[in-house]
């Protein structure tokens, strides 16, 4: 973008974004899953990544969260380069994610899912500590879990096992597990996938509460347009691994190229 004024007229320059990913490319055998994709996210900002199935959305999350190594490109989070860091190191810096497919442990209670996340954050977990130390939660661990249970409205199901929960509650538990590391940046891969209207509403409300009370920046992959409109200020549109549009939420949703590629609307 061409600056219209020089910096002497704007002594307060824009702060650097919390996340800046530039020129990310990823190839799987013959398939170019991501081609030169750049996105940025400001502190406390929520942006959405939309696009048809197979567009490369989950691959982008995998590259940004460290699950996959990008072939090219740079990722800077809060001024620190991330390319050589794995998922655990990135999560210690304050980056959390949920996965497109729900991944909960059947027989484990809701509270225990959060407790395991808490112990992995604090480094207290692991086989030896479980064998040789009392695994009773400390007061601090208990309070941290309780705060997340309250925030997400899960306190009434805290003792239920994960396999007895509705899909909507299960997705809230996954969100809760991600929140236990007090992330400054949260990647959510299709949080409303498989949910009915009421459950989607409950998820939107929970995410609004997280935005409001914790100022967490969010990157949201989501097909539910009302949810995107409600939560995201900006949208990036991926199609066949390339960014085809980006901008303010309403502008992008009204863009005819986007409507044709993504929403299946004839232009
Ligand atoms: P989206 O999340 O937008 O639906 P994905 O990022 O899952 O898309 O996939 C983008 C493309 O990359 C698809 O064609 C998919 O089949 C392919 N792909 C994703 N992950 C792998 C992988 N681990 N190995 C090979 N191909 C993959
Ligand atoms: Mg996906």
Image (tube, rainbow, N blue to C red):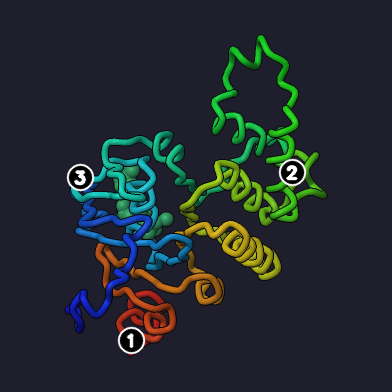
* Residue at mark 3: 71
What is the x, y in percent for residue 73? 20, 50
Q: Quadrant of residue 56?
A: bottom left
Separation of disc 3 and disc 2 at Cα?
41 Å
Residue 161 visible to the viewer: yes
Closer to the eye: label 3 or 1: 3
Mark 1 and ligand 1: say if the CB distance to the nearest ligand atom is below 8 Å. Answer: no
Q: Looking at the picture, tell me which residue is in the foreground, 2 or 69.
A: 2
Q: Residues within 10 Å of mark 1 (few under 14, many from 20)?
A: some
Secondary structure of the residue carrying tag 3 is: loop
Q: Looking at the picture, tell me which residue is in the foreground, 81 or 51.
A: 81
Identified at 39% across, 86% down, the residue is: 254
* Residue at mark 2: 146
Res 181 label: none
Identified at 62% across, 40% down, the residue is: 104
* Residue at mark 1: 256
Separation of disc 3 and disc 1 at Cα?
32 Å
Q: Is 146 on the left-hand or right-hand side of 212?
A: right
Residue 195 visible to the viewer: no
What is the x, y in percent for residue 209? 64, 62
Q: Earlier in the sequence, mark 3 or mark 2?
A: 3
Quarter that holds the C terminus: bottom left
Q: Pointer 3 and pointer 1: residues touching (CB < 8 Å)?
A: no
């Amino acid at each position: 973008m061409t600056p219209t004024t020089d910096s002497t007229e704007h002594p307060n320059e824009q702060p650097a974004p919390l996340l800046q990913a530039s020129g990310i490319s990823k190839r799987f055998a013959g398939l170019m899953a991501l081609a030169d994709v750049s996105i940025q996210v400001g502190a406390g900002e929520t942006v959405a990544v939309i696009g048809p199935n197979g567009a490369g959305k989950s691959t982008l999350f995998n590259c940004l969260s460290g699950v996959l190594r990008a072939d090219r490109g740079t990722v800077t989070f809060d001024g620190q380069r991330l390319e050589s860091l794995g998922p655990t190191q990135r999560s210690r810096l304050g980056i959390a994610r949920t996965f497109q497919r729900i991944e909960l442990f059947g027989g484990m209670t809701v509270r225990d899912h959060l407790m395991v996340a808490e112990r992995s954050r604090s480094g207290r977990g692991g086989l030896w500590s479980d064998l040789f130390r009392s695994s009773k939660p400390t007061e601090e661990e208990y309070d941290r879990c309780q705060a997340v249970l309250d925030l997400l409205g899960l306190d009434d199901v805290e003792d239920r096992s994960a396999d007895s929960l509705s899909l909507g509650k299960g997705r809230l538990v996954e969100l809760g597990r991600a929140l236990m590391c007090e992330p400054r940046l949260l990647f959510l891969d299709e949080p409303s996938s498989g949910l009915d209207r009421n459950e989607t509403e409950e998820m939107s409300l929970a995410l609004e509460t997280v935005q409001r009370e914790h100022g967490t920046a969010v990157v949201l992959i989501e097909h539910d347009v009302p949810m995107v409109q409600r939560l995201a200020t900006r949208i990036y549109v991926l199609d066949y691994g390339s960014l085809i549009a980006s901008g303010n939420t309403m502008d992008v949703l009204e863009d005819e190229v986007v409507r044709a590629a993504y929403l299946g609307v004839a232009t």
